[in-house]
Image: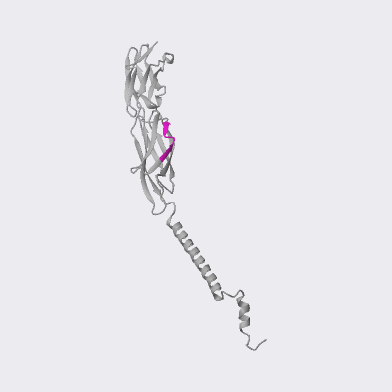
C-alpha cells in the first residue's frame, strides 16, 4: 500500500460549544508524487473539518493535518460517543485510500426553560393554567412540578406532576389553582403564587403567576336582590292597605252598594 495515515490520539472529550482537534499524519510510501483529499466521515462530519483538506507529498515524505471538532451546544447533538473516520483518498492511486478511525465523547449539558400560560387568571372558584417545560439540553430529563403561594391560601392540582422530557422537546402540565376559602361578598382578592419545575439534576425553575379571586355574590347581584326584596315588601304593604280600606268603608253591611240605595229615599216614600 502506497499510503499510510494515523491519528496521534484515538479520541477526545469535548464540552458542547467547545472546540478541539487531533493531529493526522499522512505518509506517501509510493514512487510518485501524490495528492490527497481529506474529509471526515461519520455522524460528526457536520461539525468537523480537516485543515488543510488537500495535501501533496513526494515519495517517502509525510505531512500533518488537523482534524477539528466543534460540537454545538444544542439538543440536536446528544451526549455520548461519536465514532468518526478520516477518509484519505490518493488521487493517483485511489485504490490505496485509508480511513483511520477515532471517537469524540460529547459531554452532557442541561438547559431547561419554562412558561406559565396564562400568567394571570380570574375566577370565583379557581382557574386553570398550563406549564410548558422545554428541554434544550442534550440529555433526557425528569422534572417535578409543584405549586406554592406565600400565604398558603391556594390549593394546587397538577396533572401530571412529573414529566420526562427528551432533548429538544417540550412537555405540558395542567395546573388547577383553587382558593382554600370562598369569598361570598366584598372585594376581589389577589393571590400571588409560583409553579416550580425542578429537574432531577438541575436548578429549580420558578414560574410566577397571579390569581384574582372574585366574590361568589358580586355587589350588583346583592343590590338587585335588595331592590327586589324592597319591591316585594312595598307591594305586600300596598295590598294590605287596600284590603283594609275596603273593609273599613262599611264593616257591618254585607252589601254596601244596596244599603246606600235605600238611604237616599225620602221619609214619606213607599
Residue at the right extreme? 270
- The residue at 38%/43% (across/down) is 154
Between residues 16 and 149, which one lies in front from this camera angle?
A: 149
Q: Which residues are magenta?
A: 156-164
Between residues 269 and 146, which one lies in front from this camera angle?
A: 269
Image height of 139 relative to 115, above or below: above
Magenta region, main secondary structure: strand
Residue 111 screen position, x and y as percent: 36, 33
Image height of 119 relative to 235, above or below: above
Asked where in the image residue 65 lies, by quadrant, the reply is top left
Residue 33 screen position, x and y as percent: 36, 15
Between residues 196 and 166, which one lies in front from this camera angle?
A: 196
> Does the magenta run of residues contain 29?
no
Residue 122 screen position, x and y as percent: 42, 48
Q: Can residue 38 be seen from the camera position used here?
A: no
Horizontal side, residue 227 vs residue 26: left or right: right
Colour setting? one colour
Residue at the bottom extreme? 268
Asked where in the image residue 3 lies, by quadrant, the reply is top left
Locate the N terminus and report the quarter of the image it occupies.
top left
> Does the magenta run of residues contain 163?
yes
Image height of 40 relative to 117, above or below: above
Residue 98 screen position, x and y as percent: 40, 15
Locate the C terminus and report the quarter of the image it occupies.
bottom right
Q: Can residue 164 be seen from the camera position used here?
A: yes
- The residue at 48%/61% (across/down) is 229
Amino acid at each position: 500500500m502506497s499510503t499510510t495515515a494515523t491519528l496521534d490520539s484515538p479520541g477526545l472529550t469535548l464540552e458542547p460549544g467547545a472546540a478541539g482537534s487531533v493531529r493526522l499524519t499522512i505518509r506517501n510510501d509510493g514512487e510518485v508524487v501524490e495528492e490527497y483529499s481529506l474529509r471526515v466521515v461519520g455522524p460528526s462530519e457536520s461539525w468537523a473539518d480537516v485543515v488543510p483538506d488537500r495535501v501533496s507529498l513526494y515519495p517517502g515524505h509525510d505531512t500533518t493535518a488537523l482534524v477539528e471538532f466543534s460540537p454545538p451546544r444544542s439538543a440536536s447533538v446528544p451526549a455520548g460517543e461519536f465514532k468518526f473516520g478520516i477518509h484519505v483518498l490518493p488521487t493517483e492511486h485511489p485504490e490505496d485510500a485509508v480511513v483511520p478511525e477515532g471517537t469524540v465523547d460529547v459531554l452532557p449539558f442541561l438547559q431547561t426553560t419554562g412558561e406559565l400560560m396564562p400568567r394571570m387568571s380570574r375566577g370565583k372558584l379557581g382557574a386553570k393554567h398550563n406549564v410548558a417545560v422545554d428541554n434544550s439540553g442534550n440529555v433526557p430529563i425528569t422534572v417535578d412540578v409543584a405549586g406554592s403561594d406565600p400565604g398558603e391560601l391556594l390549593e394546587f392540582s397538577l396533572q401530571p406532576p412529573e414529566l420526562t422530557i427528551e432533548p429538544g422537546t417540550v412537555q405540558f402540565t395542567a395546573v388547577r389553582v383553587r382558593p382554600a376559602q370562598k369569598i361570598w361578598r366584598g372585594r376581589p382578592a389577589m393571590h400571588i403564587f409560583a409553579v416550580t419545575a425542578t429537574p432531577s439534576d438541575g436548578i429549580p425553575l420558578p414560574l410566577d403567576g397571579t390569581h384574582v379571586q372574585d366574590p361568589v355574590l358580586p355587589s350588583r347581584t346583592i343590590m338587585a336582590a335588595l331592590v327586589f326584596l324592597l319591591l316585594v315588601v312595598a307591594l305586600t304593604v300596598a295590598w294590605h292597605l287596600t284590603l283594609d280600606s275596603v273593609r273599613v268603608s262599611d264593616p257591618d253591611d254585607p252589601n254596601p252598594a244596596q244599603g246606600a240605595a235605600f238611604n237616599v229615599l225620602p221619609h214619606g216614600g213607599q
